[in-house]
Image (cartoon, rainbow, N blue to C red):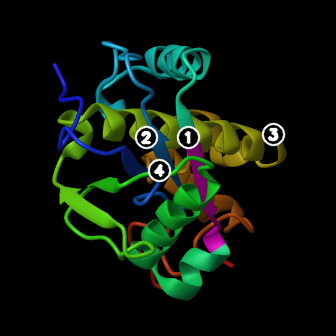
């Protein structure tokens, strides 16, 4: 069972991102506040859940009135500022989307850029420890998956509907065959043995 709160007092928001290791598409983050007495026991680290279970949990959280914000940083911005800073920016944008006040931010991982001088705590594998971070991991993952499925419609050759932009063998083979799309991250190693960028 995941923990509900880091500290008993105050309102906490969980933050997590999805897509850091992808070759294509944005990095997407979510920030989630769990309303009082709205615990969903199915919440878990999104990586441990099937696509179907993630979507079911997402719908249940929306039905239960979970407060959430989503932040997106494009592949172009990732190339400009690097993936680590893009992840922090995506989380800040997700926090900006929240209309509710909060006292504390719980972040999955070991680093974070301070947000508006609000108390924050970095928790390694936090999505497997705290409900709010698990909820954020599910929102971030499902939002990004839906985006990549949309991009797949215009670029089916990369099989993003299946790989969501991650560096699978089929994805790298498609890059080698067709070159890079506008959605590919130019600063990433797109091919296994890359001697020349396929742009």
First in sequence, mark 2 or 1: give its number. 1
Tell me, yes or no, whether the highlighted magenta stretch contains residue 74: yes
First in sequence, mark 4 or 1: give its number. 1
Taking 60 as reference, is 90 above or below it? below
Q: Quadrant of the N terminus?
A: top left
Residue where numbered disc 1 is placed: 68
Which residue does the image show at 58% across and 63% down from the upper left?
93
Q: Disc 2 and disc 4: Cα gap in Å?
A: 20 Å
Q: How many numbered circles does the render carry? A: 4
First in sequence, mark 2 or 4: give its number. 2
Residue where numbered disc 2 is placed: 136
Instruction: Please tell me whether mark 4 sits on a helix, a strand or a loop.
Output: loop
Which residue does the image show at 65% across and 48% down from the upper left?
158
Percent across and percent down for residue 191 are 46, 68
Tell me, yes or no, whether the highlighted magenta stretch contains residue 134: no
Q: Disc 2 and disc 3: Cα gap in Å?
A: 26 Å
Q: Residue furthest front?
A: 9
Question: Which marked residue is nearer to the observer: mark 2 or mark 4?
Answer: 2
Question: Which marked residue is nearer to the observer: mark 2 or mark 1?
Answer: 1
Residue where numbered disc 3 is placed: 153
């Amino acid at each position: 069972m995941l923990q509900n709160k880091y500290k008993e007092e105050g309102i906490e928001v969980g933050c997590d991102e999805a897509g850091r290791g992808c070759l294509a598409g944005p990095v997407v983050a979510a920030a989630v506040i769990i309303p009082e007495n709205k615990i969903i026991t199915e919440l878990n680290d999104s990586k441990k859940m099937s696509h179907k279970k993630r979507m079911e949990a997402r719908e249940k959280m929306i039905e239960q009135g979970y407060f959430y914000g989503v932040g997106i940083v494009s592949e172009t911005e990732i190339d400009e500022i690097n993936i680590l800073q893009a992840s922090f920016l995506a989380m800040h944008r997700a926090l900006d989307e929240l209309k509710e006040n909060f006292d504390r931010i719980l972040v999955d991982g070991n680093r974070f850029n301070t947000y508006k001088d609000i108390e924050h705590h970095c928790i390694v594998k936090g999505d497997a420890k705290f409900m709010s971070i698990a909820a954020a991991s599910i929102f971030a993952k499902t939002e990004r998956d839906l985006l990549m499925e949309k991009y797949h419609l215009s670029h089916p050759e990369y099989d993003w509907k299946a790989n969501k932009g991650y560096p699978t063998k089929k994805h790298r083979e498609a890059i080698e065959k067709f070159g890079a799309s506008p959605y590919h991250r130019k600063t990433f190693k797109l091919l296994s043995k890359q001697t020349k960028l396929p742009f």
